[in-house]
Amino acid sequence: MDPATAPHRLRELPSWLLSQAALAAARLVNQTLADAGITDTGARRAHYSLLAALDEFGPASQAELSQRCGIYRSDLVAVLNELETAHLVRRAPDPADARRNVVTLTEAGADQLRGLDRVLTAVQDELLAPLSPAERAQLVRLLRRVLDRHGG
Amino acid sequence: MDPATAPHRLRELPSWLLSQAALAAARLVNQTLADAGITDTGARRAHYSLLAALDEFGPASQAELSQRCGIYRSDLVAVLNELETAHLVRRAPDPADARRNVVTLTEAGADQLRGLDRVLTAVQDELLAPLSPAERAQLVRLLRRVLDRHGG
DNA sequence: CCTATATCAGGGGAACTGACATAC
DNA sequence: CGTATGTCAGTTACCCTGATATAG
C-alpha cells in the first residue's frame, strides 16, 4: 500500500490509522520474533506477553494470565503448551484449588524473556523512527488513555 | 481483559498498545457496521474504504483501489463482488486497457457512503472519548507520521 | 445449586502467498 | 519477451463462541 495516496477520509479516521499502524507494527514484530526459537516457526506476540506477565507478577493461574494479557482462555492452552514444550514455563496443579494450574516461569523462560526484551526494544525504535522521544512518549500516553477506557 | 492489570512491559510497548487500541477500535466499528446492510452480515471496513476511494478519486481500476486502500488484489475481488451485488458500484471492462476493470461508484453507493460517514464519525467520538480535541488531533498526526514511514 | 477453571471444537474475518490466464 | 491485471485456491494467526468435565 501507499498510505500517502489513501483517501482523505481514511487518513483522518482514527480507527483506520490505528489498524494500519498496528498492522505495520505487527509486521515488524513478527519478522523479528520469527527468529526466536520457541516454536518451529519462531515466537509469537502471545508468548512474549505471557513470559512478561509471569516475570512481573510471579506464578499465576491460566485465568489470571488470560485476564492480564488479553488472551482468551481457550487460546491460552495451546500457547502454554508450546511454552511448556520449550521448557520456558512449568504447569502444575494448584494444591489450594484443584481447578487451577499454577504456571511458573523457568530460568530458561526468564532468559528468553530478556532476549525478547532486547530485540523488541529495537523494533520499537524502528517503528517510531519518525517521532522524537517526546512524541513517542506522548503517543504511548494517548494510547494508554484510550485503552484504559475501552477494555473489559 | 483488564488492561490496567497488564504487565508494565506491555503497557510501555508501543506495538502492543497499538494492537490493543486497534482491536478496541475494530470492535466498535464492526459493531456499528453490522447494522449497515451491504451484505447479509452487514458491512465491513473494506467496503467503506473502497466507497471512500471511489468517491474521492473517481472511477478506478482494481489495482489502483488495492494500492490506495491497502487491500490485497486477491481479497478485493470478493469485496467488490459484494458491493456490485448491492448495486453500490459498477464494474466494466476498461476500453483503453482490456486487462483492467473500471470500477465506478453508483448513486446508491454515494448514499451508502454518506450514511457510513455519519455513523463512523460517531464511533470515533466514542473511541476517543477520553481525549480532548487537541489530543485527538495530536494522536491522528502522530499515527500518520508513523504510517507514512512504514507503508509499502 | 451456581459459578469458576481448564480444555476442546469450531467459525469467521483478515493478512498473506502463489498460481494462472489474459493482455499490455 | 517480460510485466501488469484480475481471479482463484489455499495457509496462517487471531478473535471469538460455544460446550464440556471437574471442582469450588
Image (spheres, coloured by chain):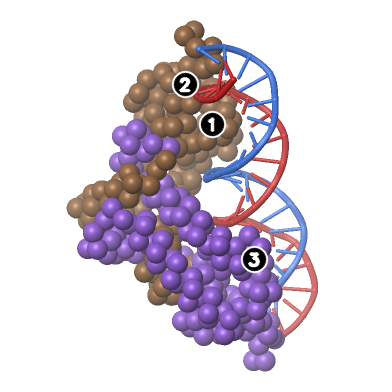
Chain colours: A purple, B brown, C blue, D red
Q: Is residue B94 above or below residue A15?
A: above
- Which residue is more in the foreground, A121 or A17? A121
Write down the chain letter for disc 1. B
Labels 1 and 3 share a subunit: no
* Picture quarter with the C terminus of chain B: top left
Q: Position of residue B41 (x, y in %)?
A: 57, 38
Q: Which residue is pictured at 53% across the width and 62% down the height?
A: A33
Q: CA distance from mark 1 to mark 3?
A: 31 Å
Marks 3 & 2, CB-CB < 8 Å contact: no
Residue C11 image position (x, y, % from top left): 69, 47
Please tell me whether mark 2 sits on a helix, a strand or a loop. loop
Mark 1 near mark 3, Cβ–Cβ under 8 Å? no
Which of the labelled discs sits on residue B73, or is there none? 1
Tag 3: amino acid: Thr
- Name the residue carrying label 3: A39
Q: Which element type, helix, strand or loop, lies under badge 3?
A: loop
Question: Which residue, given by chain and number where applicable, does mark 2 sit on?
Answer: B61
Same chain shared by disc 3 and disc 2: no
Q: CA distance from mark 1 to mark 2?
A: 11 Å
Relative to B101, is A79 on the left or the right? right
Q: Amino acid at mark 2?
A: Ser
In the displayed orientation, state which residue is furthest to the top. Answer: B95
| Residue B122 horizontal side relative to residue A151, left or right | left
